[in-house]
Image (cartoon, rainbow, N blue to C red):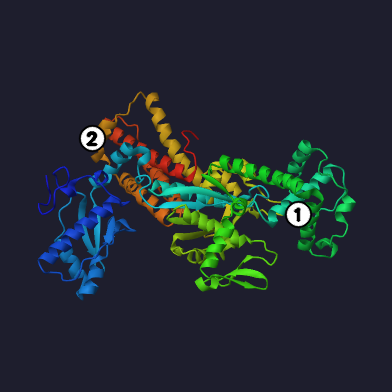
Amino acid sequence: MCLDRRQPPGADGGCYYSRPFFDRPKTASCPVKAHLQELISQALLDLKRKELLSVALPEQIGIERTRSDDHGDFSSNVAMVLGKQAKTNPRALAEQIVKHLPTSKHVLKVEIAGPGFINFFQTPGSLQTVIKHVLNQGHEFGRARAASREKITLEYVSANPTGPLHVGHGRGAAYGATLASLLEARGFEVQREYYVNDNGRQMDILAASVWLRYLELCGERVRFPDNAYKGEYVFEVARELRNIHGDDFRHSGLGIEDGLPADESQGGDKDRFIDAMIERAKKLLGERSYRVVFDAGLNAIREDIRQDLSEFGVQFDDWFSERGLATSGDVERALKRLADADLVYEKDGAQWFKATQFGDDLDRVVVRENGASTYFASDVAYLLNKLERGFDKLIYVFGADHHGYIARLKACAQGLGADPNRIEVKLIQFAVLYRGGVKVQMSTRSGSFVTLRELREEVGTDAARFFYVMRSHDQHLDFDLDLAKSESNDNPVFYVQMAHARIGGVLRQLDEKMLSHNRALGDASIALLGAREELSLLKTMSRYPEVLELAAESRSPHVLSYYLRDLAHDFHSFYDAHKLLIPEEGLRNARLNLSLAVKQILRNGLELLGVGAPERM
């Protein structure tokens, strides 16, 4: 039966406002909001027809969830917005809007609060429908149609392949992987990319470090630079190099050090010493042998990073080579494009990009005095490569120390003739480990750091993935190792997983108690779910699609982790307050349907976080 004859019929010929929320074609993440916006729009149109309102109607009517149940479920400030434009009392306008609202079986009552807020209270029946839709849609609940929105390339981790990933890289990996999953869940087409910095000075330092350790294994005595990479992993690469090539790259230790400047611990400069050592290695080894040593370090560490990330549940569509930009001519092509736009000038023998013309604080060197292109030149070429691949958005995930890259990359985009708003840079703040309340010290160059692999082995992948994204990426993260390992309600990942496992336990008890689950009977008995804990749980469940949308649009995975804790809390409260396996078949099956729907949402959400959903704990 149509509840308001003034409204256009739906596709099924019935009243549009009586159709189930989740059955309507929609793009909105919250169908309830969309429904209330439609009601208000119809009321405003009615007021316009009766010449009770003269201002232009808003394109978008604001609807927000309320913070307190006392104020209903949703609230709109439309009367205050229009009242200001119409120069009329907002509360009086709100009364007129409410008076002209179409009838809806999804709205229990409407109240006016304060200066003119319109508060909507949902009917229990409206809330209860979410169970059926979760169970029908399963894994797809909360998701938008695949590839229905922008095409995005998301670059994250991109750690230099000069050593194993440490816990700081782990936070960027967890953030990037979760953000990619969230974006895909909400209909964006996402390409995951790792930019391999396989060219330049840091890689030369690694090559020199490997060669010097190799010489030690050959029995040569040679000074190991203060600024070289000192981790045990360098020895491992050197051992494998010697196993394959024997003494092919051996040279006298005395001859290697002749004429080198003093190192830092000798009263000299560490950078001058390591640079001189690199040049000595290149000269003694020759181009071909040096490349073998260089590639031994690069390939071993890159593959270790790839395996480490894979075991962490982090995969990439492309491992993009920085060296490939140079060998393909992309760097020269990008710089020519800037030069053709009169955005490159010469100064002190170097070539500079006019970055300040586009808001950067400094102009940037793209070609040094010696004719070598800079890291920044590679950044320009990489950006051009992404733009030419047709992505609508380019998201970079960097460490907090890369703050200067925001203005730099946007200046590059403008210099290349692209809209700088297509570029987003997300800065990941540092993660600090604590064990027993004491901060764990780390130093990458010295090798005294906690690797991502060690963290996973200590606390498990599930805890690591959850803890990394349980705070906003732009806030420092204090990672409590003891808490992450604890089996207590204070441990957020344990608390959420326990809710999922608890439901699994209930289902296993059905057979033990010689009971059964009848979903159809549960659907028919859904109106029995009216207890406070049940309604609270239903409200939280209905928020899931809009939580995904908010987390994706704001690039904030922590929003989902907060939500899952709220959902787990509401389920635990419901479970503690009400028995599920009761003799009354109708209520038992309704509660089982409710529990299964919660279980589905928990599993969906945990999957997006890269966290398992165990059946037993």
Q: Which mark is residue 59?
A: none
Q: Secondary structure at mark 2?
A: helix
Q: How many marks?
A: 2
Choose between 363 and 505: the one closer to the eye.
363
Q: Is residue 428 visible?
A: no
Q: Amino acid at mark 2?
A: Ala
Q: Which mark is residue 524?
A: 2
Quadrant of the image containing the N terminus: top left
- The residue indicated by pointer 1 is 228
Q: Quadrant of residue 335?
A: bottom right
Q: Is residue 493 visible?
A: yes
Choose between 336 and 323: the one closer to the eye.
336
Q: Secondary structure at mark 1?
A: loop
In this rendering, the answer to whether 339 lies above or below 477 is: below
Where residue 494 appears, as percent x and y from the top left, is 50, 43
Where residue 454 appears, as percent x and y from the top left, is 64, 44
Is 444 left or right of 424, judged from the image as shown? Answer: right
Judged from this view, the residue extending furthest toward the bottom is: 87
Residue at the image point whose x is 47% and y is 40% from the top: 497
Choose between 149 and 320: the one closer to the eye.
320
Where residue 518 appears, as percent x and y from the top left, is 29, 29
Residue at the image point whose x is 88% and y is 57% from the top: 258
Is 247 left or right of 553, judged from the image as shown? Answer: right
Judged from this view, the residue extending furthest toward the right is: 254
The answer to the question of whether label 2 and label 1 lie on touching residues, with beta carbons closer than 8 A, is: no
Q: Amino acid at mark 1?
A: Ala
Where residue 341 appears, as percent x and y from the top left, is 51, 68
Whichever of callouts 2 and 1 sits on the residue coming sooner in the sequence is: 1
In this rendering, the answer to whether 455 lies above or below 277 is: above
Number of residues whose C-alpha sits closer than 10 Å to that of mark 1, classed few (under 14), some (14–19) or many (20 or more): many
